[in-house]
Structure formats: C-alpha cells, structure tokens
Amino acid sequence: MFSIAGHDLFSGTFQSQRVHVAASFKAVEYEWEHWLGQFEGLFKGMYWYSAIVHLETELAGKHTFSWAVDSGHEPSDAELQMSCEWEREAGFAV
C-alpha cells in the first residue's frame, strides 16, 4: 500500500521525498468521510508540505483532494485545510 521513491535524482526524488499510497476499496464512497478522517489523522502526526488524494468511483466520479501548507506542517492537532476538485465526464446525446 505504501511506497517511497529512491534517494537519487532518477528515482523520483529531486527536491523532496515522495510517499505513494495506493489501494482499492469496495464501496469506499459510503465510508469516505471516515476514510478522510483517518487519513488526516495520520498526516496530523507527520512533517509534510502537501498531500494529494485521487478518488475515482463509479457513483461519484473522479475527485482530487489536496492539502498544502506554506512553511511545512509539524505534528499537531490543528485543523487541516483541504480543497476538492470534481471531474465530471459528460457526453452529448445525439
């Protein structure tokens, strides 16, 4: 579920370290608020500058959730500011 790029330039680490998280869940859109709470709880205890979550479901479409801070987040219980973009695919009826 978790992956980290190598420490050299050609492994994906240029100016910062990346941690990748990928998983497939059954009907995650029904428990999404709970999942987000767990995710933010994990991030509240870490040092970081930004986080992006891509969610794609059959019912809700594609969403991109992002968190970013200017000076870096230090572990705390402070509220995190998240933004969401929804990508909707629509076709035209002919």
Image (cartoon, grey):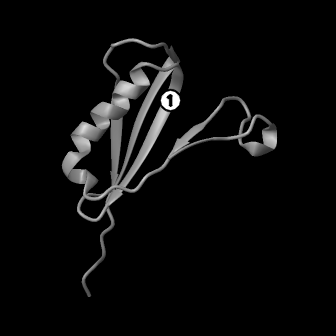
Residue 76 location, x and y as percent? 39, 11
Residue 90 location, x and y as percent? 30, 70
Measuring 28% from the left and 65% from the top, which residue is drawn there? Answer: 58
Estimate how packed mark 1 is, as few (under 14), some (14 to 19) or many (20 or more) residues with alpha carbons within 10 Å: some
Measuring 25% from the left and 45% from the top, which residue is drawn there? Answer: 32
From the viewer's perspective, is 74 left or right of 88? right
Residue 85 drawn above or below residue 87: above
Measuring 42% from the left and 43% from the top, which residue is drawn there? Answer: 53
Q: Nearer the viewer, residue 58 or 37?
A: 37
- Which residue is most to the bottom? 94
Q: Quadrant of residue 93?
A: bottom left
Residue 94 drawn above or below residue 79: below
Residue 68 location, x and y as percent? 46, 27
Q: How many marks?
A: 1
From the viewer's perspective, is 19 left or right of 39? right
Q: Nearer the viewer, residue 8 or 24?
A: 24
Query: At numbered mark 1, what does the secondary structure look like: helix, strand or loop?
Result: strand
Q: Nearer the viewer, residue 60 or 42?
A: 42
Residue 94 drawn above or below residue 14: below
- Quadrant location of the C terminus in the rendered image: bottom left
Identify which amino acid the numbered label 1 is placed on: Ser
- Which residue is most to the left? 30
- Where does label 1 land, which residue? 50
From the viewer's perspective, is 31 left or right of 52? left
Measuring 30% from the left and 37% from the top, which residue is drawn there? Answer: 36
